[in-house]
Image (tube, helix red, strand yellow):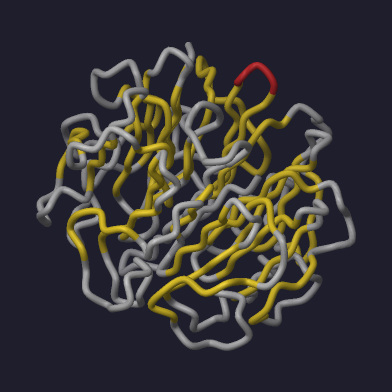
């Protein structure tokens, strides 16, 4: 399983994180651990279906009806049937148990999928379709899957990140090609990656750092296959990572901070193995750092660490994966711009790293160099945005 996050530098110095959706069955679904990281906020969903968010809220990405930030979890909307959530660059999207899709926040590029470019501060339904099963939010674009295995994207398309064969923005969902066996999708900074039922991985969009993994730096306007057999793939700001069917981990793209985990800072245009371990279960790529989980429940992070986002107790960058603490109870993780959140056994949510906007949900704005539990939150999933977080909460 791979969880993706994407972050891109912005005029305000923020980045956008992308999250990848897990796909354990034929097609991805939101029934378990269904949140993704986005910009300046976090979102979490609970078994009871409540959606919680905290952090920066300049464009209404928390979904609480205003633009005031929150240092502690606040409820987004009144619905109690949320099944999955994704936080993008100053916007968020989430699915409900009835298969409907909802988005809110910044809409300058049509990334809410509502047919216009007007911002929203509360969740608004995307069209009338009731077969949505997964969603991933990038910097200014979003992609989602339907129960028939089709993939759909909308929003900013300046680099071809919608995979539609052109660079024209879309303000409503448009199907990506004709394939009907997509099992996961991950929207990054300005590129997107996905996985199909036959274990093939595909990427498209921006490729200036080789983040598409096809051996060059030429943008692609439609999906191109990444060599290998994969169980999951995640798109970060300008790098990508994926777990192979033999449980080894490979990364490619930008690597200035060591976010590829290959022991150096040289970028790669094709997949390169990170370490020699074959125990990887999932991975999540942020702007310049990456975290992954072993099947044994241990958590590992690497790359940029200026705000303590690696959770290692210091602010030194790492060029190879290092274990975060001693816990073997990690169930999932999500990476934001410069912070990270994860879930442990029982659904407890832990966050660490940058906290200038309260994106750790701890009631203050002090950075943390190691995992700290978010008080009172038990969740089925958590998504980290650039400066916010979102959770599907159970208590």
Which corner quadrant of the image does residue 364 belong to? top left
Q: Residue at x 63, y 76 (%)?
A: 256
Task: Determine whether 231 is above or below 260 in the image.
Answer: above
Q: Nearer the viewer, residue 186 or 285?
A: 186
Q: Is residue 357 visible?
A: no
Q: Residue at x 60, y 63 (%)?
A: 201
Give percent across and percent down for residue 93: 32, 41
Q: Tell me how many marks there are.
A: 0
Give percent across and percent down for residue 163: 37, 69
Q: Nearer the viewer, residue 28 or 19?
A: 28
Q: Residue at x 63, y 55 (%)?
A: 198
Give percent across and percent down for residue 311: 69, 45
Task: Determine whether 354 is above or below 228 in the image.
Answer: above
Give percent across and percent down for residue 66: 16, 34
| Residue at the farthest right position | 276
Q: Quadrant of the N terminus?
A: top right
Q: Nearer the viewer, residue 188 or 144?
A: 144
Q: Is residue 167 visible?
A: yes
Task: Determine whether 91 is above or below 82 in the image.
Answer: below
- Give the left or right position of residue 20, taking residue 113 as reference: right
């Amino acid at each position: 399983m791979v969880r993706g996050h994407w972050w891109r530098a912005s005029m305000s110095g923020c980045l956008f994180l992308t999250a990848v959706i897990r796909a354990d069955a034929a097609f991805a679904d939101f029934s378990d651990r269904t949140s993704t990281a986005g910009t300046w906020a976090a979102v979490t969903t609970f078994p009871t279906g409540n959606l919680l968010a905290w952090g920066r809220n300049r464009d209404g990405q928390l979904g609480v009806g205003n633009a005031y930030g929150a240092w502690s979890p606040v409820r987004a909307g009144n619905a109690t049937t949320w099944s999955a959530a994704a936080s993008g660059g100053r916007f968020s999207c989430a699915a409900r148990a009835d298969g409907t899709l909802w988005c809110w926040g910044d809409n300058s590029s049509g990334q809410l999928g509502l047919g216009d470019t007007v911002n929203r501060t509360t969740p608004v339904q995307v069209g009338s379709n009731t077969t949505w099963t997964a969603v991933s939010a990038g910097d200014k674009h979003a992609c989602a899957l339907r129960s028939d295995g089709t993939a759909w994207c909308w929003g900013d398309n300046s680099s071809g990140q919608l995979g539609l064969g052109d660079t024209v923005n879309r303000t409503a969902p448009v199907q990506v090609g004709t394939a009907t066996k997509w099992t996961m999708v991950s929207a990054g900074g300005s590129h997107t990656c996905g996985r199909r039922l036959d274990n093939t991985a595909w990427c498209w969009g921006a490729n200036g750092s080789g983040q598409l993994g096809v051996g060059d730096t030429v943008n692609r306007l439609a999906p191109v296959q990444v060599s290998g057999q994969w169980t999951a793939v995640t798109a970060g700001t300008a790098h990508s990572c994926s777990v192979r069917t033999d449980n080894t981990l490979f990364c490619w793209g930008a690597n200035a901070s060591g976010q590829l985990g290959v022991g150096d800072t040289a970028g790669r245009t094709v997949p390169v193995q990170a370490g020699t371990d074959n125990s990887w279960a999932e991975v999540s790529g942020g702007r310049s750092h990456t975290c992954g989980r072993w099947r044994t429940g241990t958590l590992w992070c690497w790359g940029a660490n200026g705000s303590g986002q690696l959770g290692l107790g210091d602010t030194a960058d790492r060029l190879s994966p290092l274990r975060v603490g001693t816990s073997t109870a990690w169930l999932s993780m999500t990476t934001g711009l410069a912070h990270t959140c994860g879930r442990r056994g029982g659904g407890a949510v832990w966050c660490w790293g940058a906290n200038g906007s309260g994106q750790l949900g701890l009631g203050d704005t002090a950075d943390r160099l190691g995992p700290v539990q978010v008080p009172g939150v038990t969740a089925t999933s958590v998504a980290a945005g650039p400066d916010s977080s979102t959770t599907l909460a159970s208590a």
